[in-house]
Amino acid sequence: MDLETAVVRRRMVRSFAGEPLPNGLVDRMVGAALRAPTAGNSRGTAWIALEGPEETSRYWLAATDPEWRASSRRWPGLSRAPAVAVSLYSPAAYQRRYGAPDKHPDGGGPATATWPVPYWVADAAFGVMTLLLEVTAHGFGACFLGNFRNEDSVLAAVGAPSEWRLFGAVAIGRPDGSDRRSASLDRAGPARSDRLHAGRWGGTAGPRPRERCPDPRS
Ligand SMILES: Cc1cc2nc3c(=O)[nH]c(=O)nc-3n(C[C@H](O)[C@H](O)[C@H](O)COP(=O)(O)O)c2cc1C
């Protein structure tokens, strides 16, 4: 599958068939996600690949509450995912990297709280997106699950050392075709033209004169 097709086809999948993924594929896809860029080549992101019910249940039991599992219409389909990749990031790794002489000759590096954009979060997101596209390109489905509660429990369940934080998790498997359309997709929202501006805010997107915007392939 070419990249453009994978980008267009990718959709969050929340109901999986339970069969295992081909042997080694999870490591391969998560390994590809490690190729996502990281600021200053800090490589301050990491993954825990969980495969099979015994391993994936470590994530689910830590990340979700019994009440949610008892009542959510999504739980059965999500819980069948044969793999879950847990995405971690380390703010301390960026503090160390940006305190290195080539980045910060005075030493120390900026305090993580002062960064206008927390690169550790950006890098974790780049990695997750890479994994979502990899999974799609291999003909499987995935859903990103955010970190909105129980972070400490998830980190303990996967044995993460203390400097690591939870970004989220990616459930991976073969879509079983019974996903119900997410209500989020049907919400009214900003139009494409409100989000894609050419030249400046409010500029209408369209072809530019060739001399201003040469085709990089020519
Ligand atoms: C930061 C972030 C957090 C998300 N968290 C969840 C989540 O916890 N559970 C879930 O089912 N979907 C989650 N999603 C998926 C979005 O709801 C979904 O991407 C959006 O509705 C668009 O649908 P699509 O990805 O299928 O195109 C999350 C997406 C992002 C980018």
Image (cartoon, helix red, strand yellow):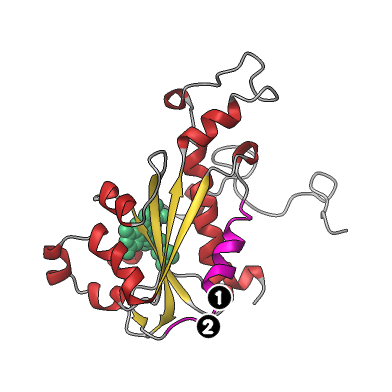
Q: Residue at x 53, y 83 (%)?
A: 22
Q: Are marks 2 and 1 in contact (CB under 8 Å)?
A: yes
**Horizontal and vertical percent position of residue 146:** 34, 54
Q: Residue at x 63, y 48 (%)?
A: 37
Q: Is residue 94 visible?
A: yes
Work out which quarter of the rendered image holds the N terminus and state it. Answer: bottom right
Q: Secondary structure at mark 2?
A: loop
Q: Is residue 21 magenta?
A: yes
Q: Which picture quadrant has residue 200? A: top right
In the rendered structure, which amino acid carries the disc numbered 1? Answer: Leu
Tell me: residue 65, above or below residue 142: above
Q: Secondary structure at mark 1?
A: helix
**Horizontal and vertical percent position of residue 201:** 55, 38
Which residue bears the numbered disc 2?
22
Crowdedness of circle 1 by 10 Å Cα count: few (<14), some, many (20+)? few
In the rendered structure, which amino acid carries the disc numbered 2? Answer: Pro
Tag shown at residue 25: 1
